[in-house]
Image (spheres, rainbow, N blue to C red):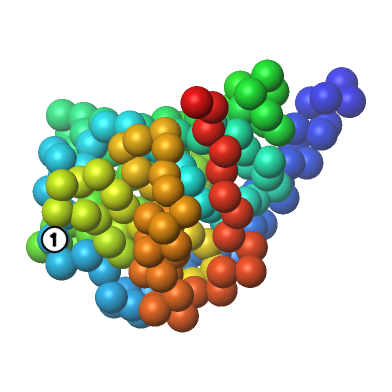
Amino acid sequence: MKGKLLWLTGIIAMAGLLAACNTGSVKMPNQELAASVDLNRFMGTWYVHGYTPTFLDRNAYGATETYELNESGKIETTYRFRKGGPDGKLKTMTPTGWVHDEKTNAEWRMRFFGLFTSPYYILYVSPDYGETVIGHPGKEMAWIMTRSSQISDTKYQTLRMELARRDYDLSELTRVEHGE
């Protein structure tokens, strides 16, 4: 019973966080997004190397985000990580996304727990679709991802600069470790 109460409390807290982050009234992105995103090339698994932790994914290890475009045009998303380290408990979240701006495919919406929707901005994707930087209208939440489980410090800093030049608050941006 105590575990269920803790889980329910966590869901309610996440609902509050997402409601605070939900900027559904934002009509146009308040920052520069990628000029164009080829959805088919963007689909697949990305390794998360930097992220803004929430109470649900704090201390993530080996985090990945996988996108799959289904027949109805929805983007089935699977976010996986181990809590605290390589032997930590495997956590999985499965929000559903959809393209909000079909002209560029760089602005999505993500629905969490079937209840709350939040903007998802593809700020940058490399020409070879090997690196991406994801942001949010509040400029407080961000993700740095690549197709590889490893990233050099130089490459990480270069991708981090994509956020800095858009005036993101990077004080909470956290590196994610991945095993060899």
Residue at position x 21%, y 55% in the image: 126
Report the residue that reaches farthest toward the right.
Answer: 2
Q: Quadrant of the N terminus?
A: top right
Q: Residue at x 44, y 62 (%)?
A: 157
Query: Residue 34 lies in what quarter of the image?
Result: bottom left
Q: Does the rendering let one see residue 56?
A: no
As drawn, is 69 to the left or to the right of 76?
left
Tell me residue 134's x, y (percent): 38, 57
- x, y percent for residue 158: 38, 64
Q: Hey, what amino acid is under mark 1?
A: Ser
- Numbered circles on residues, count: 1
Task: Label 1, secondary structure: give it.
Answer: loop
Along the viewing direction, whichever of 3 and 85 lies nearer the viewer: 85
Task: State the image quarter where residue 106 is shown.
Answer: bottom left
Identify whether 169 is placed above or below 57: below
* Residue 105 sits in quarter: bottom left
Residue under the image location 56 percent in, 74 percent down: 169
Is residue 156 shown to the viewer in this render? yes
Q: Camera-side residue: 49 or 94?
A: 49
Residue 145, compared with residue 26, is above or below; it is: above
The answer to whether 137 is drawn above or below residue 57 in the figure is below
Q: Residue at (60%, 34%) from the top-left corner?
A: 61
Rendered location of residue 177, percent (x, y): 57, 38
Residue under circle 1?
36
Picture coordinates of residue 173 (x, y %)? 58, 60
| Mark 1: few/some/many CA within 10 Å (<14, 14-19, 20+) | some
